[in-house]
Amino acid sequence: IYGGLKSIPGSQPWQASVQIRPKGSTADFRHICGGTVIKSCWVLTAAHCIEPGQDIRVVLGGVDLGKTESIDQLLEVEKTIVHEDYKETSEAVHNDIALLKLKGANGDCAEETQFVKAACLPNGPFPDGTECTISGWGATEASDYGSSQLLDAKVLLISQDKCSDKKVYGKAIDGTMFCAGHLKGGVDSCQGDSGGPLTCTEGDTHYLYGIVSWGDSCGKENKPGVYTRVTNYVNWIKSKTGQ
Ligand code: 4AZ
């Protein structure tokens, strides 16, 4: 996260760290992407985060990737479901969404605690200009290697019109994506935040509105972050996870 601040433990309880290691290896798992808990046994992430031939696990609860904390929950992944129409072109990333089914017994995987909670799926659109929150362990203005501490930042939802301006992303943007950030630059998601949440709040309810997907570099003027528009995929998610 560019221009972010250290997250207070428990403030982004739906945040997941998606980690991989070569299949069958005993090496340490390493963080590759963010994700979002949407149910006890389901984490939503970006399709471009899934690399076949890797063991995947998910870490929930903690804010410091550099050490194991008592609030951490480590979960194995039973299966991954990548969107059937996921496609990366030189212009944009399409249908950048995937589900991770966690291993557990009879519908219980992640345990709900002060530090681990599901985000809600959105019921409809939020207006342009709404202030929402992004979080992740990705690259920062200070380091290309990401942050061992979870960071979060506020971003504004940007209209399709502005996002499709020639100065911004032009025709690369379609209705399955949206831009969020600050057109002046400075606050943005970045490499390693991919797959993680953009949440918008209504009352006390936190909705997963976007998935960190792509962008032209990070934090640059007129190059806001581009997010998978989750409202577009709620039926797909429900069809795969059951209700
Ligand atoms: C990336 O490379 C990436 N500024 C993620 C987010 C953004 C740019 C790049 C948005 O994974």
Image (cartoon, rainbow, N blue to C red):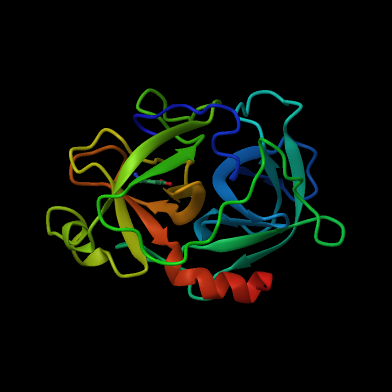
| Residue at image point 47% right, 42% down | 193
Of all residues shown, which one is farthest toward the front?
A: 203
Examine the rendered structure and indicate whether residue 153 appears above or below residue 102.
above
**Rendered position, 31 above or below 142:** below
- Residue at image location 37% in from the left, 52% down from the top: 214
Asked whether 179 or 114 is in front, the reply is 114
- The answer to whether 65 is drawn above or below residue 50 in the figure is above
Residue lying furthest left: 166
Rendering coords of residue 200 (x, y %)? 42, 50
- Give residue 115's position: percent from left, percent from top: 66, 36
Question: Residue 162: which quarter of the image?
Answer: bottom left
Left or right of 100 in this view: 120 = left
Front residue (pair 140, 232):
232
Q: Give percent across and percent down for residue 203.
A: 45, 48
Which residue is depicted at the point 14% across and 59% down? 165
Can residue 191 be spotted in the picture?
A: no
Left or right: where 235 falls relative to 110: left
Which of the pair 216/104 is nearer the observer?
104
* Residue 85 showing in the rendered view: yes
Left or right relative to 11: residue 29: right
For the N terminus, the image quarter is top left
Place of residue 135 in the rendered image (x, y in percent of width and height, measured from the top left): 47, 39
Decide if residue 84 is on the left or right side of residue 72: left
- Report the number of discs: 0
